[in-house]
Image (spheres, grey):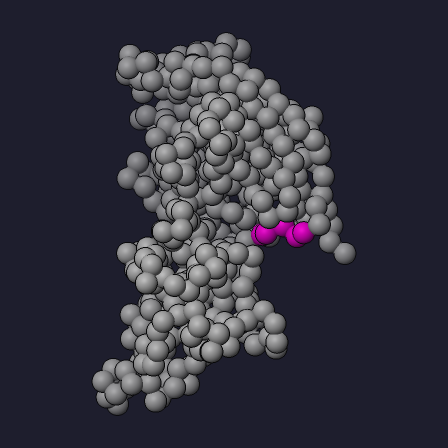
């Protein structure tokens, strides 16, 4: 039986509080609401027509300057890192965060108000397992700012962080496991801090209307200015850890790994979240069982050809072995020596051209999209292929498992998919494809 820490959680009831937003200085009310399994965290703008929602996921990241902004279409939510940090560390997997402005209340500049909110709303386990991602190999990202983030395999979620200010002033170091109890007492109370020389121009431009000593510690030269004394002698590095947790919450799973962060910032944190999302998708593609299910759930080649207009020699999907929710598909292509492309690619050394693997990904993603739109009277056109990598050669006799996940759609016209081809439990190619759809 699963223990409760292995189950997804939401909040028991709605709960809210009001305050001031940092950048606009406006009053804002925020309310956390329960949400079903696999919903994740979504922000809902109650102040806008139709109350649009924004998924708190890395694909929706828009800006990382000073704070983390997410958005979909023209709708934005700024400074999401403190509320996301508290949700993630306190164990809330699914929730809707309703707001009547474009930024959550800044509170006292820490995550304490959000921890209090979550405790008032209560935590309830749900009937589905949590998504964990265990890092298998060391990963790292480096930013021009001098930030360095490394993730090492670890059974737990740990962060070891070194914070250093201008000229290495205020260098602080802390290493800790992150559990709800440790987070609540050691990390959440740590407040935002700013360097006077960095905020002075922003104050002049009136870009931080809600900023004050009520919600941030200001460091000016050797002086530390704040409304109340420091809550910890090393409060700055603790806040850096708080921000890392908030930014990494965007990657979409719970991390088992040890993060070693040197001079982290939102941009580097976001880069790491992006890298983790890619690795997580790759690992998830490998975890799918390599068996053909019998009967229901998939599509045979005739059903595939009812959906796709492609025919020999350009049909790159033999069958679909399954769909997951409305966003994922797994398809299969058996590669035989009789494929026409092997004649010329290359004589005596047959390897499947990488571009045809990209075509296979595109065809699998199209099946998913046309199934979603419930039509086959349209043709999908490729607009772009990003982050395409060919990792291993594909030879005659190989069976390619093609995985595609829709990560974004705009109306019925535009879609983005993250795709992987897998042979013998290894990712052979991957890419992020964008399509547009036109009526035939
Ligand atoms: Zn922060």
User: Relative to 132, is 338 on the left or the right?
Assistant: left
Tell me, yes or no, if residue 378 can be seen here.
yes
Inspect the magenta stretch and tell me whether residue 130 lies in it: yes
Residue 273 image point, x, y percent:
44, 45
Residue at the spot 58% in from the left edge and 52% down from the top edge = 132
Q: Quadrant of residue 122?
A: top right
Q: Is residue 248 above or below residue 282?
A: above
User: Relative to 170, is 5 on the left or the right?
Assistant: right
Check the picture and name the quadrant holding the C terminus: bottom left
Question: Which span of residues is magenta-colored?
Answer: 128-132
Check the picture and name the quadrant holding the N terminus: bottom right
Front-most of residues 402 and 253: 402
Residue 227 image point, x, y percent:
50, 9
The tally of labels here is 0
Residue 5 image point, x, y percent:
69, 46
Q: Is residue 115 above or below residue 277?
A: above
User: Relative to 302, is 206 on the left or the right?
Assistant: left
Residue at the spot 52% in from the left edge and 73% down from the top edge = 299
Front-most of residues 16 and 81: 16
Q: Is residue 237 above or below residue 92?
A: above
Please identify the dominant SS of the magenta region.
strand
Residue 349 image point, x, y percent:
28, 86
Residue at the spot 46% in from the left edge and 19% down from the top edge = 21
Front-most of residues 251 and 70: 70
Tell me, yes or no, if residue 173 can be seen here.
no
Q: Is residue 183 above or below residue 226?
A: below
Q: Quadrant of residue 398?
A: bottom left
């Amino acid at each position: 039986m699963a223990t409760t820490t292995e189950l997804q959680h939401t909040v028991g009831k709605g709960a809210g509080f009001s305050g001031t937003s940092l950048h606009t200085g406006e009053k804002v009310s925020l309310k956390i609401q329960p949400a079903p399994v696999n919903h994740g965290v979504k922000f809902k703008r109650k102040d806008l027509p139709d109350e649009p929602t924004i998924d708190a996921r890395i694909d929706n990241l828009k800006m990382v300057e000073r704070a983390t902004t997410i958005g979909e279409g023209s709708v934005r939510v700024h400074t999401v890192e403190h509320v996301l940090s508290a949700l993630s560390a306190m164990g809330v997997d699914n929730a809707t965060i309703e707001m009547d402005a474009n930024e959550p209340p800044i509170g006292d500049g820490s995550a304490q108000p959000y921890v209090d909110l979550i405790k008032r709303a209560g935590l309830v386990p749900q009937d589905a397992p949590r998504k964990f991602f265990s890092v298998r190999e060391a990963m790292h990202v480096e930013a021009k700012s001098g930030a360095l983030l490394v993730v090492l395999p670890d059974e737990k979620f740990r962060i070891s962080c070194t914070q250093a200010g201008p000229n290495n002033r205020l260098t602080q170091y802390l290493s800790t496991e992150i559990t709800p109890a440790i987070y609540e007492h050691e990390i959440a109370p740590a407040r935002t801090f700013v360097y006077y020389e960095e905020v002075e121009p922003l104050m002049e431009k009136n870009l931080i209307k809600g900023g004050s000593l009520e919600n941030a510690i200001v460091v000016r030269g050797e002086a530390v200015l704040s409304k109340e004394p420091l809550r910890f002698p090393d409060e700055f590095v603790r806040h850096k850890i708080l921000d890392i947790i908030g930014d990494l919450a965007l990657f979409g799973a719970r991390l088992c790994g040890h993060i070693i962060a040197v001079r982290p910032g939102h941009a580097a944190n976001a880069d790491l979240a992006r890298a983790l999302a890619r690795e997580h998708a790759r690992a998830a593609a490998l975890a799918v069982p390599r068996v053909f299910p019998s009967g229901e759930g998939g599509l045979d080649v005739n059903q595939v050809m009812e959906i796709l207009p492609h025919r020999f020699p350009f049909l790159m999907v033999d069958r679909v072995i399954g769909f997951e929710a409305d966003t994922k598909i797994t398809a299969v292509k058996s590669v035989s020596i009789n494929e026409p492309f092997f004649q010329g690619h290359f004589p005596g050394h047959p390897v499947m051209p990488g571009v045809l693997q990209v075509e296979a990904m595109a065809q699998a993603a199209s099946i998913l999209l046309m199934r979603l739109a419930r039509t086959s009277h349209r043709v999908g056109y490729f607009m772009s292929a990003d982050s395409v990598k060919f990792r291993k050669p594909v030879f005659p006799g190989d069976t390619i498992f093609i995985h595609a996940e829709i990560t974004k759609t705009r109306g019925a016209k535009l879609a983005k998919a993250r795709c992987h081809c897998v042979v013998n439990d290894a990712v052979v190619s991957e890419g992020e494809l964008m399509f547009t759809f036109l009526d035939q």
